[in-house]
C-alpha cells in the first residue's frame, strides 16, 4: 500500500473514532495530512464518521484540487500550518462541545485557554491560545495561525472549536482529545487551579514539556 493510500485509511479511521466517541458531530470538522506533492483533506461538508478513502480530497503543492471530492473550505487554515511548520504532517479540527462552550463561557486566558491542571495536558498539549471569532474559512484566521504555527500545537477558535497539528494524524487527534477532556475536567471541577511552578519545572526537566 502506498503512503498516500495509508494516509487516506488513517484519516478515515481517526475520523470515525472521533465521531463515534462524540468529539465531533454531523458534518462538522476536518482532517488533513501532508504529502510529498501536496495534501489530503476531508471534503467539504463531509461527516468524519463516514468517510470514504477514495473521496478524500487531494490538493497539489500549488493549492489546486486534483482528486477526490471538493476540499474543505478550511484548506487555507491547514496550509497556514504546513507552510510555516515543516515538521507538522497533520491537522485536525473539530467542534468539540466542551471547548466550544469554553469560548462562550470564558477561557482562562486568551493566550492560554486552560490552566495546566494535569501533567498530561502540559506534556501532550501545552499552550493553546484563543483566536477571536471569524466566519468559517476566514483568511484572517489563517494569517494569525501562520504567525504562531511553530510556537504552539494548536489554537481554539471562538465558537468553532479546536485546531490541532502534529507529526501524524493519530498524534494530532490524541492531542485534541486531551485538550477536549481537559476542558471537560475544568468545567466539572468548577475551575480547578493549575499545577504549581515546581511541578511544571519538573515536567520541563524530565519530559521536555513546552510550558
Image: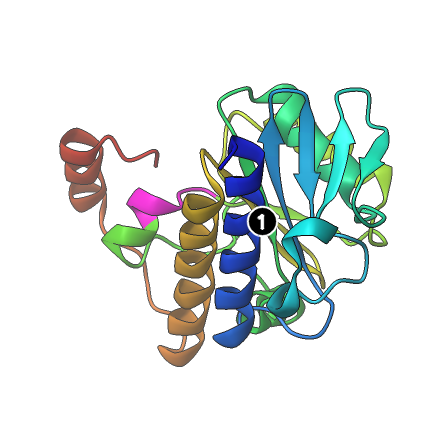
Give the structural element (helix, strand or loop) at label 1: strand
Residue at figure coordinates x 63%, y 27% from the top left: 82
Where is residue 38? Give x, y as percent. 69, 25
Residue 146 appears in which quarter of the rendering?
A: top right
Residue numbers of the magenta segment: 122-127
Whether 141 is drawn above or below 161: the answer is: above
Q: Residue at x 77, y 40 (%)?
A: 75
Dot 1, crowdedness within 10 Å: few (<14), some or many (≥20)?
many
- For the residue pair 145 and 59, the one nearer the viewer reads as 59
Name the spot of residue 176 as percent of width and height, x first: 47, 54
Total number of numbered discs in the rendering: 1
Left or right: 160 with respect to 190? right
Q: Is residue 126 magenta?
A: yes
Where does the image place residue 113, in percent across and percent down from the top left?
52, 54
Q: Is residue 49 magenta?
A: no
Nearer the observer, 144 or 166: 166
Which of 28 and 71 lies nearest the eye of the viewer? 71
Q: Is residue 56 rendered to the left or right of residue 44?
A: left
Q: Quadrant of the C terminus?
A: top left
Q: Residue 204 falls in which quadrant of the image? A: top left
The residue that appears at 45% across and 75% down in the rendered structure is: 187
Direction front: furthest residue: 1
**Residue bearing the label numbered 1:** 92
- 92 horizontally vs 207: left or right: right
**Horizontal and vertical percent position of residue 141:** 77, 40
Q: Is residue 125 left or right of residue 88?
A: left
Amino acid at each position: 500500500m502506498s503512503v498516500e493510500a495509508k494516509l487516506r485509511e488513517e484519516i478515515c479511521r481517526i475520523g470515525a473514532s472521533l465521531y463515534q466517541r462524540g468529539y465531533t458531530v454531523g458534518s462538522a470538522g476536518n482532517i488533513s495530512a501532508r504529502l510529498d506533492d501536496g495534501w489530503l483533506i476531508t471534503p467539504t461538508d463531509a461527516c468524519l464518521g463516514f468517510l470514504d478513502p477514495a473521496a478524500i480530497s487531494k490538493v497539489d503543492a500549488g493549492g489546486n484540487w486534483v482528486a477526490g471530492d471538493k476540499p474543505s473550505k478550511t484548506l487555507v487554515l491547514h496550509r497556514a500550518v504546513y507552510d510555516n511548520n515543516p515538521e507538522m504532517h497533520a491537522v485536525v479540527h473539530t467542534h468539540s462541545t466542551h471547548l466550544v462552550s469554553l469560548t462562550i463561557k470564558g477561557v482562562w486566558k486568551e493566550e492560554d485557554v486552560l490552566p495546566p491542571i494535569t501533567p498530561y495536558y502540559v506534556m501532550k498539549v501545552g499552550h493553546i491560545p484563543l483566536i477571536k471569532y471569524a466566519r468559517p474559512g476566514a483568511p484572517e484566521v489563517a494569517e494569525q495561525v501562520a504567525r504562531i504555527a511553530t510556537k504552539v500545537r494548536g489554537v481554539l477558535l471562538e465558537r468553532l472549536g479546536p485546531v490541532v497539528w502534529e507529526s501524524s494524524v493519530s498524534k494530532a487527534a490524541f492531542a485534541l482529545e486531551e485538550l477536549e477532556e481537559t476542558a471537560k475536567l475544568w468545567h466539572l471541577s468548577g475551575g480547578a487551579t493549575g499545577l504549581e511552578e515546581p511541578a511544571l519545572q519538573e515536567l520541563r526537566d524530565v519530559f521536555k514539556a513546552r510550558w
